Image (spheres, rainbow, N blue to C red):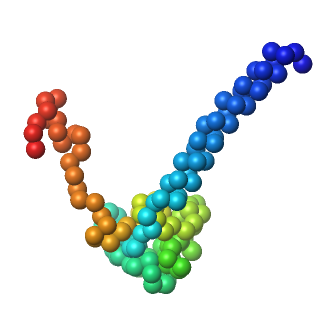
Amino acid sequence: MSESKKRIIRNDIIIILIPLVIAALLLVLFQTFSKKGSLVLIEQDGKEIGRYELSKDLHIPIKGSNGQTLLILNIENESAFVSDSKCTDATCERTGRISRIGESIVCLPSRVMIKIVGDSSENRPNLPDAVAFYENGVRRQL
């Protein structure tokens, strides 16, 4: 192989490895510094149907409007996971365990969302976003 082809291959490897290493480092940092949640929030059809503490081991069947069990949520060892689902794709089961604030499990066929939140003292207040400062393209004061 010529020297220029070796250099191209080496440079290609470096260009691929640098973003992968940066992504791995960011993932480790986010996992290390993200807060553990204290509550599991369950919503069905956009309505809250329950809040449970992560510190208590529970087995929660989530039922549909017809009374049929759609999925089973387990809370064990301060994490939550879906152990059984009646939907065809079972994506919610494959999501695995969640325990950190902001993590969620979504079952679209059942219209169920399970997410980890902090207690009320940990939740941030609702602050206006950038859109709230502009109305019809003109900046306004709040």
Q: Residue pushed farthest right?
A: 1
Name the residue at 39% across, 78% down.
52
User: How many discs mark residues in the rendered view?
Assistant: 0
Q: Residue furthest left?
A: 141
Direction from residue 114 to residue 134 in the image, left or right: left
Which one is in front, 77 or 96?
A: 77
Q: Quadrant of residue 138?
A: top left
The residue at 67%/33% (across/down) is 16
Judging depth in this view, the residue of 94 and 27 nearest the camera is 27
Question: What is the x, y in percent for residue 66?
Answer: 39, 76
Position of 57 relative to 65 (above/below): below
Q: On the picture, is 29 further left or further right than 114?
A: right
Q: Is residue 130 above or below residue 77?
A: above
Residue situated in front as seen by the camera: 63 or 26: 26
Q: Is residue 133 visible?
A: yes
Q: Answer yes or no: is residue 87 visible.
A: no
- Counting from the top left corner in percent of width and height, residue 142 is at 10, 44
Q: Quadrant of the N terminus?
A: top right
Image quadrant where residue 65 sits:
bottom left
Which x, y percent locates residue 10? 76, 27
- Residue 13 placement: quadrant: top right
Residue visible at 43% across and 64% down in the picture = 35
Q: Is residue 48 left or right of residue 53?
A: left
At horizontal 48% and vertical 68% (from top left) the residue drawn is 99
Residue 107 percent coordinates (x, y): 48, 63
